[in-house]
Image: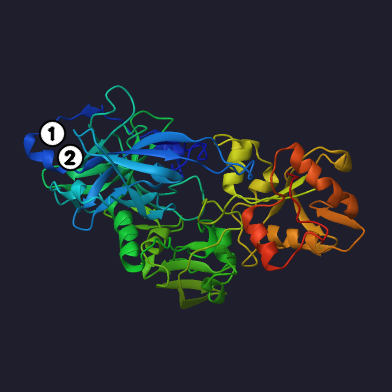
Amino acid sequence: MVDFEPDEPDAKRARIDLEDASEAAAQPLRERTIVAPPPSTSKALKSVLKVFTTKTENNYALPWQMRPQRSSTGSAFVSDSKKRFILTNSHVVTNATTIQVRRPGNPRKWRARILCEGRLCDLALLTVDEDEFWADAFMVLQFDDVPQLQDSILVAGYPLGSGSESLSITKGIVSRVVMARYSTAQTSNKLLGVQIDAAINFGNSGGPAFTSLQEGKIGGIAFSKLTSGDNIGYIIPSQVVTHFLTQFEMHGEYRGCCSEGFRWQEGENAHLRSYLKVPADRSGIHIFKVDPLLPAANVLQEGDFLMEVDGVPVADDGTIQFRNEERVEFSHIIRSKYVGDELKVQVVRSGKVLELAYTLQQSRPLVPALHGVECVPSYFIVAGLVFVPLSIPFLEHAYGTSAWRKLAPPYLLALIPEYCSKADEQVVLLFQVLAAEINFGYRFSNIRCVSVNGTDINNLAHLAKLVDGSREEYLHFGLEGGCMLSLEASAAKRESPKILETHAIAMDRSPELRQSADSAHISTSQPFNTSAPH
């Protein structure tokens, strides 16, 4: 299980970030109860598995090497024995080199593999190939509706601690339903989440949250906890789970969730409403930025006032009616759709009410967040200058998983919510300088590189291409703020292999950049594309 820290949402992988942390912490707590199920419910619990993984993770701070291997455990359950489906959390199995599962009361471990992984929704679908594993009948489990407030929930799994080899069941109550961010990504895409007052601990991740053990009904999957409060946990509701499974059934993969395609602010201020010519009897939100790469940019404009989404009124605080007295952010409607679906909106523009529609797509953030989906560790080194693309995993590894939002430079953090202006745009950083005589006096770190020899760069591959293809006497790197870093090109080529050897770095660039260089027919007779001597 991973932690959820509402005031510091970056603390661990796969936690959710609520808009109002104080409200989350203020929820009344109920005493945790460990429940012994009656014999009639034991069939449902036979589907709850313990997961054993060995992981080797990438290192974004030292992208030419991997992090040390480690082992971890989690929980899972058989969601459909006929299809041989096993569900768990993405963060339980991501980066795993081996995955094994074990049935309750049985010491044997079975090798499992990933069929589909959705890191944005923190879900993974596994299977076991051996027929013997499926020989014993599993109870047919059913996904229930999103639990109601005050509904009882039984969370089953294998939390760490004394007796962690045995199945544990914890009873709790649903305290609220919110739109939340599921992962460290902290992207704009929030999904429906259910807060419960049952203790969810490390090892519980991926376990089922039963609404009825007797009937085998599941209201969601355990995935997170609130570290600043006692016995406050979170489950992924069945609606999000079925959305994930539907995509796998339709496409054989998880294609993510839809983005609204714009950034917005509350429409409560009377002066703002008057300026935008919003009717006095209407409510909604102000659209102040539109993603230029999504279909929304062909329909929406900055300054539009959004009043309805698919015919549902949007309040001035950006919420819609969910159930009874419950309200959630309007993005719930959008996240419930699939990529390629149409979204109908009603806006006020220059005092006129317009009925519009556009196709929903995924957004590509300027600062990617999901390893293996939006980004991979990349680097390019010339004369000891280490260039990397900015990403959330990089910030986590460079500044600490729990501290990067406090320690990273504010000008880098300010880029996180921004959209790409080009499809291949990256923020390229001069991450560090591997000290050598050729770069003496250059003490830059984590500063944006904007140009090479006067040419603006689009991404890291573009920077490498400009360096490789340069015929200038000097290499000039333009840095944000007007600073410049210059190196004699011939000296840079001569010294680069020595610097790589000193720091035990085999190659001057990451694999995908080497492939790009090979496809461009860059030879070692050109100024760069170097490796450490053997």
Q: Please indicate whether residue 267 sits to the left or right of residue 26 in the image.
A: right
**Residue 396: percent from the left, percent from the top?**
58, 40
Distance in Å between CA atoms under marks 1 and 2: 9 Å
Q: In which quarter of the image is the N terminus?
A: top left
Q: What amino acid is found at the position of numbered circle 1 in the picture? A: Pro
| Horizontal side, residue 73 vs residue 154: left or right | right
Q: Are marks 1 and 2 in contact (CB under 8 Å)?
A: yes
Q: Where is residue 158 drawn, in percent x and y?
A: 29, 33
Instruction: Please say whether residue 484 is visible from this viewpoint.
Output: no
The residue nearer to you, when weighing 173 against 308, is 173
Q: Which amino acid is tagged 2? A: Leu
Residue 443 seen anywhere in this rendered image of the structure: yes
- Disc 2 crowd rating (10 Å Cα; few below 14, some 14-19, many 20+) is many
- Residue 53 percent location from the top left of the image: 38, 39
Determine which of the numbered discs, if any, sits on residue 45 in the image.
2
Pointer 1 local density, CA inside 10 Å: few below 14, some 14–19, many at least 20: few
Left or right side of 137 for 417: right
